[in-house]
Image: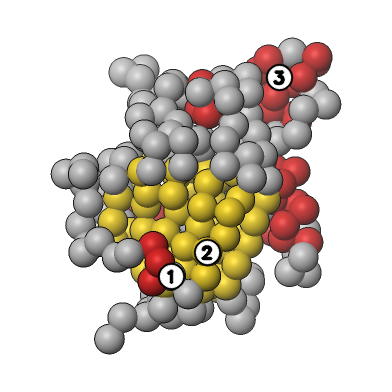
């Protein structure tokens, strides 16, 4: 078990809900204040693009900029407070067996893929398209998609200040767990990227577990 783990281990069988999210797919669920959500990288090296919205007012949503500013760190890990655009704590990372997660590189899109990898890849599905599909189920549009967290994605900062996307460091079964500090809508794109090493060039499934609030 990683040194980054913090809160006591809970049996997955104790989860109130368990969701299998196939490779390349979008997903969303509601998590109530006090509940915890665990995202499990089943096979390792799978980037999981994630957004948070306030459940009863989706105009309040995750802010990567405010999260980085408050933490004073380039990465998300155990103890990180995920901050909203209103300056409120949406969730706290309570456990992490990987150790480092990105919140700077954003989500892949068909347009970005074309710029980075050539016009021949424009037809490939991307995280932004996953997000558009999923937020539409909750009355939102592409205008509501903001810079996201990339759980399990390895994005070192080069000495030049540029971001690099390299092989992931998560192994099979690694997970990150968040405790909700308000009622939230969790939106995920299980990243379909195959043109850079963020998924080991092989997108794989994940599991999302939701645990009831602890006494």
Instruction: Give residue 22's position: percent from left, percent from top.
Output: 64, 45
Q: Position of residue 45 (x, y in %)?
A: 45, 31
Res. 152 image quadrant: top left
Badge 1: residue crowd in 10 Å (few <14, some 14–19, many ≥20): some
The residue at 64%/56% (across/down) is: 27
Q: Is residue 61 visible?
A: no
The residue lying at 31 percent from left, 81 percent from top is 214
Residue 18 shows which numbered tag?
Answer: 2
The residue lying furthest to the bottom in this view is: 215
Look at discs 2 and 3 and give the one toward the viewer: 2
- Kindly identify which residue carries mark 3: 115
**Position of the C terminus by quadrant:** bottom left
Tell me, yes or no, whether the two marked residues, 2 and 1, touch with CB atoms within 8 Å: yes
* Distance of label 2 from label 1 (alpha carbons): 7 Å
The N terminus is located in which quarter? top left
Tell me the SS state at disc 1.
Answer: loop
Query: Please, is residue 130 above or below residue 136 in the view?
Result: above
- For the residues labelled 1 and 3, the Cα–Cα distance comes to 42 Å
Residue 95 seen in the figure: yes
Tell me the SS state at disc 3: helix
- Which residue occupies 69% across, 27% down? 112
Q: Which mark is residue 134?
A: none
- Of tags 1 and 3, the one toward the viewer is 1
* Image position, residue 80 (x, y; %): 30, 56
Q: Which residue is mark 1?
A: 15
Q: Report whether 203 appears left or right of 89.
A: right
Q: Secondary structure at mark 2?
A: strand
Looking at the image, tell me whether mark 2 or mark 3 is earlier in sequence order. 2
Cα distance, mark 2 to mark 3? Answer: 37 Å
> Closest to the observer: 114 or 21?
21
Give x and y (percent) for residue 146: 61, 52
């Amino acid at each position: 078990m990683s040194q980054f783990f913090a809160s006591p281990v809970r049996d997955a069988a104790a989860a109130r809900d368990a969701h299998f999210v196939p490779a390349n797919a979008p997903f969303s669920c509601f998590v109530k204040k006090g509940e915890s959500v665990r995202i499990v990288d089943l096979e390792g090296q799978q980037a999981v693009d994630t957004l948070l919205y306030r459940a009863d007012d989706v105009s309040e949503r995750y802010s990567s900029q405010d999260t980085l500013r408050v933490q004073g760190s380039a990465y998300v890990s155990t103890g990180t407070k995920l901050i909203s655009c209103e300056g409120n704590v949406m969730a706290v990372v309570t456990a992490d067996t990987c150790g480092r997660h990105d919140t700077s590189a954003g989500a892949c899109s068909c347009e970005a893929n074309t710029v980075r990898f050539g016009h021949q890849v424009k037809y490939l599905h991307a995280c932004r398209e996953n997000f558009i599909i999923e937020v539409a189920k909750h009355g939102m549009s592409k205008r509501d998609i903001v810079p996201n967290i990339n759980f399990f994605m390895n994005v070192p900062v080069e000495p030049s200040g540029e971001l690099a996307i390299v092989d992931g460091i998560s192994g099979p079964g690694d997970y990150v767990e968040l405790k909700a500090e308000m009622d939230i809508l969790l939106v995920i794109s299980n990243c379909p990227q195959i043109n850079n090493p963020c998924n080991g060039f092989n997108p794989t499934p994940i599991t999302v577990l939701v645990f009831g609030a602890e006494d």
